Amino acid sequence: MAALESFCLSATTFAPTGEVDEEAQAAYLDRFVESNIGVYLGSGGNGEGHALHPDELRRVYEIGVSVCKGRVPVQANLPETHTPRAAVEQARLAFDAGIEVVHMYTLEQRHGMRPTDAEYTAYFETVLAEIRQPVVLCVNPNNGYLPPAPVVAALCGRHHQIVGIRSTNTSAAYLVGLKDAVSREDLRYYAILADTPTALALGFDGIFGGKANLVPRTVRRFMDLCETGDVTRFGPLYEQLMRLHSHVMRWHPAGARWIKMGMRALSLPGAEGGVRPPYLIPGDEEMAAFAAGLRQVGIAEIDERLGA
């Protein structure tokens, strides 16, 4: 099979005084380059993009481009917006900083707003009339709205700057229907790491997730084994990664929280700065329980960082 792409929804590093720690950010991103894992910068969840001022977000993009471009793919996972104008502004900010591809979710759903299919379509028709650079559409039912496959397919048919579809927590039936509905053969499909078996069965092109924030070498080894198509080889490593998933999900939702807890437990670059409000790093007792749980996962890369 063709080489699978691998991406991480990467964290943003902060200094103890609160500002973006640019030196730590560069060191943090180097870990993904060393493991041949691409990055999605500035996510509204893992990357705390919603807590970043536009000037800060620009610097995060610029640092990512400086460290990663030409070595691994460097893309922007735009925070959700409430208006097409805001989405266009965010996308232009990313492209002006040298980002290669932007990823876009549905509308931000404030005050219980849930888009209709017509509103979702109109939102992207307006955005894509302005943004002609490469875009990946992200579908995630956890965001409160899952666009029907024909709606996504229609957008892909009209807008060829859509270069891929990224799926999070969707059913296998939905993914099959999506691939059936989309007539373009040049689109690339990406699934979250937990859905790797389904993605492999459906011939997806890449895997993404947040676990590489803590264990990039392990994720790289897992991806290499996935390419063999031999479940007896990649299965045990998948089991380890799912144990890690089960452990950190105790502090979910909000990937930023468990990622920053993991960064602190493993003494990774930028760990001292923690998260931005409204998130908080838990106290010493809870952090000790978090670290103890990491030791039970059975991943050698974690044990090495913890000195086990």
Image: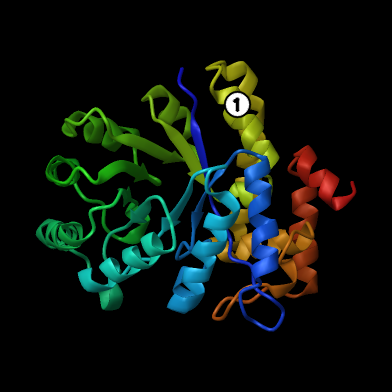
Q: Report the amino acid beneath label 1.
A: Asp
Residue beneath the point at 28% across and 35% down: 187
Could you tell me if residue 47 is visible in this image? no
User: Left of 34 or right of it: where is 202?
Assistant: left
- Nearer to us in this view, 75 or 182: 75
Q: In the displayed structure, would residue 49 be above or below residue 308?
A: below
- Nearer to us in this view, 85 or 106: 85
Residue beneath the point at 48% across and 63% down: 42
- Looking at the image, how many numbered discs can be counted on the residues? 1
Q: In the displayed structure, would residue 295 be above or below residue 198?
A: below
User: Left of 182 or right of it: where is 273?
Assistant: right
Residue 256: which quarter of the image?
bottom right
Residue 81: which quarter of the image?
bottom left
Residue beneath the point at 21% across and 50% down: 147
Query: Residue 25 location, x and y as percent?
Result: 64, 63
Residue sitting at the far right = 307
Q: What residue is disc 1 on?
A: 224
Residue sitting at the far left = 118
Could you tell me if residue 96 is visible in this image? yes
Give the crowd class for mark 1: few <14, some 14-19, many >=20 residues within 10 Å: some
Query: Residue 130 location, x and y as percent?
Result: 19, 62
Residue 23: which quarter of the image?
bottom right
Query: Residue 155 location, x and y as percent?
Result: 16, 47
Residue beneath the point at 80% across and 48% down: 295
Query: Residue 208 location, x and y as percent?
Result: 49, 43
Q: Secondary structure at mark 1?
A: helix
Q: How is the image coloured?
A: rainbow
Q: In the displayed structure, would residue 120 be above or below residue 84?
A: above
Residue sitting at the far bottom = 17
